[in-house]
Image: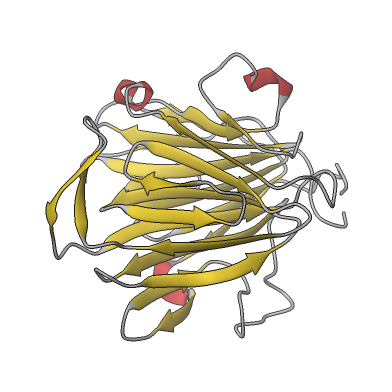
Amino acid sequence: MSTTVHEPHLDVRRADDRLKTKIAWLDSKHSFSFGHHYDPANTHHGVLMVNNDDIVTPGQGFDTHPHQDMEIVTWVLQGSLVHQDSTGHSGVIYPGLAQRMTAGSGILHSEKNDSWRFDGATGLHAERHDTPVHFVQMWVLPDEAGVTPGYEQLEIDHELLSGGLVPIASGMKDHADHAAIRIRNQYAALHVSRMRPGRPVSLPDAPFLHVFVARGDAALEGVGLLAEGDAVRVSGGGGQQLTTDTGAEVLVWEMHATVGG
């Protein structure tokens, strides 16, 4: 990894221009090269390698498959996602619950919409439903390869009520005392804001930022209106303001290094 800083630049990527995988049970949109979708000019931004916007139908999902040497953060927007892995971890991820999986030296896992409505307050499955699960899965490179695989999750819903940017996954020392799950990258942090009308949000000051509008729409200083699914890759410094007239849920990666310089 390199901490080289590029000249300030705002690179807007529209939702409809993303790479797409659509099959019977999955509607997936890829911000970067993924699987058989390969573009050598679009492999990462900063240390963020994957930003997949997935919708999975009830009773379906990703069967057991391997990962290695990647920090994988999953953020659910609607519905619930069942996780199981080869280290013995299993659970249900739902809106407001941050989850991180360290693939490390190698891990097997599955992720499925289990067709049961999950009550986060009681931790119980209440009744069958026909709601798709909508989630964003993001991968960042770790500082070190070959570490022991791991898993962590944290309920963050209360902190999001502020409407500001909340660090939900971080390897940065500055966030050690904040409500965030830990990732094994000292240069990166993921922030989420459930934005409210009339309450601007300022982006972190970092050489690399990835701003993704997961729901609703927001306006970014220097860019203008961003619709749901739009993203901006910021290089060379942050501090820009985000505003919304209608409400929005925005995911912001703050990164102080990039892959290969």
Q: Position of residue 53 (x, y in %)?
A: 43, 63
- Marks counted in the figure total 0
**Relative to 15, is 254 above or below?**
above
Q: Name the side, left or right, on which 61 lies relative to 4.
A: left
The percent coordinates of residue 222 (x first, y second) are 50, 45
Q: In this view, does 258 lie to the left or right of 55?
A: right
Residue 79, percent from left and from top: 25, 53
Vertical comparison of 16 with 104: above or below: below
Question: Residue at the location (47% across, 75% down)?
Answer: 17
Task: Look at the image and tell me whether residue 224 can be seen.
Answer: no
On the rendered structure, is 26 left or right of 12? left
In the displayed structure, would residue 161 be above or below residue 187?
A: above
Q: Nearer the viewer, residue 239 or 3?
A: 3
Q: In the rendered image of this protein, does residue 66 appear above or below residue 234? A: below
Residue placed furthest toward the top: 177
Q: Is residue 117 left or right of residue 244?
A: left
Q: Quadrant of residue 59?
A: bottom left
Q: To which quarter of the image does residue 164 belong?
A: top left
Identify which residue, 176 or 250, lies in the foreground: 176
At x 34%, y 43%, the residue is 249
Q: Is residue 92 visible?
A: yes
Give the residue drawn at x 61%, y 74%.
34
How far across and down, in percent of the image, does residue 62 sit?
Answer: 45, 71
Residue at x 42% of width, y 60% of height: 230
Q: In which quarter of the image is the C terminus?
A: bottom right
